[in-house]
Image (cartoon, grey):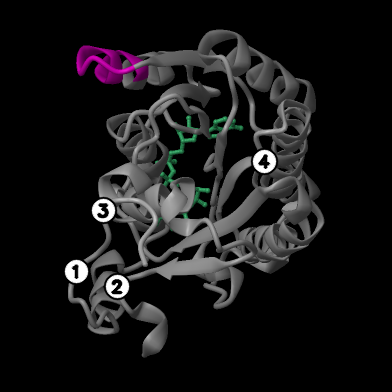
Amino acid sequence: MATKPIAELFDLTGKGAIVTGAGMGIGRAIAYRLSEAGAAVMIADIDLDAAKRTAERIKERGRKAEAIKADARNIADAGKVVEATVQAFGSLDILVNNAGIYPLSLALETTEELWDMTLDINLKGLFFYCQAAAREMTRSGRGGKIINIASIDAVHPMGEVSHYNASKGGVLSLTKALALEWGPQKIHVNAVAPGSVWTPGTEKTRQAREAKGQGVEDLLAKFMGRMPLGRPGVPDDIAKVVLFFASEASDYVTGAMLVVDGGYLLT
Ligand SMILES: NC(=O)c1ccc[n+]([C@@H]2O[C@H](COP(=O)([O-])OP(=O)(O)OC[C@H]3O[C@@H](n4cnc5c(N)ncnc54)[C@H](O)[C@@H]3O)[C@@H](O)[C@H]2O)c1
């Protein structure tokens, strides 16, 4: 017997949310969907102008959003973003850890600096944003939903990004560990693992491959040849799944990772 109508399950009215890296790409699409469902969204990005553009777009649609400059690898910023969200919207109910980088580098050429930067943003920073959010969700007694953006690379590594693969494997493991620890406080921790999604970040990767003389068209054709659903992903494909994890529709799900890859990993 259903307890609530579907529209209410997905209604995020009165919820305060943070989306990191929401100035563009997948994060921006997530912020749009959460706000469309009624959440007030803190757009946290290292690029303040991009964050402001996302927030403005949301406000033009009559929804609540604020922009804040924050570096996903800066632990002090995590606390600052949580505090600003509670101050602006009254509560923190949803955290989406989306900010991430995926610079190309062969394992034999990867420097300590590149390794640290990738792991600091994609994994260490993500942990401390989870911690700052969970402290507030525990203090408020409201619990909450944390959604970490992993990647299919967490379970199926791609070439030339071993540092990235390691960071996303860590995100998957961390998601499960935190779900285990924070379940009693009603803090749900889940992950979404995108396949290939066209964004400003993947466009940069395409240009970097082209600059190295790599046959991008061949690579793309091979990739698409393995795609049962026959098309690359768009940011909104990921945002709709994040909305599920942010909503009451996923109230009995924690510690899960949902692969959103058009079926790529099946082949
Ligand atoms: N696009 C894909 O195909 C794909 C596939 C799998 C996983 N992902 C993951 O999805 C997430 C978003 O990817 P995208 O393709 O939309 O990226 P993108 O590069 O298009 O956008 C990333 C956003 O994050 C911001 N950002 C970068 N570094 C930051 C930092 N240190 N602190 C705060 N903000 C920062 C950027 O300013 C930008 O607004 C990443 O975690 C990425 O690993 C993407």
Callout 1 amino acid: Arg
Q: Nearer the viewer, mark 2 or mark 1?
A: 2
Q: Is mark 4 within 8 Å of ligand 1?
A: yes
Q: What element does badge 4 sit on?
A: helix
Looking at the image, tell me whether mark 2 or mark 1 is earlier in sequence order.
Answer: 1
Q: Quadrant of the C terminus?
A: bottom left
Q: Residues within 10 Å of mark 1 (few under 14, many from 20)?
A: some
| Residue where numbered disc 4 is placed | 121
Marks 2 and 3: CB-CB under 8 Å?
no
Q: Which element is circle 2 on?
A: loop
Residue at numbered disc 2: 262
Residue picked out by circle 1: 231
Q: Residue furthest front?
A: 1
- Asked if the residue under mark 1 is in contact with the one under mark 2, i.e. CB atoms within 8 Å, the reply is yes
Label 3 secondary element: loop
Q: Is residue 36 magenta?
A: no
Q: Residues within 10 Å of mark 3 (few under 14, many from 20)?
A: some
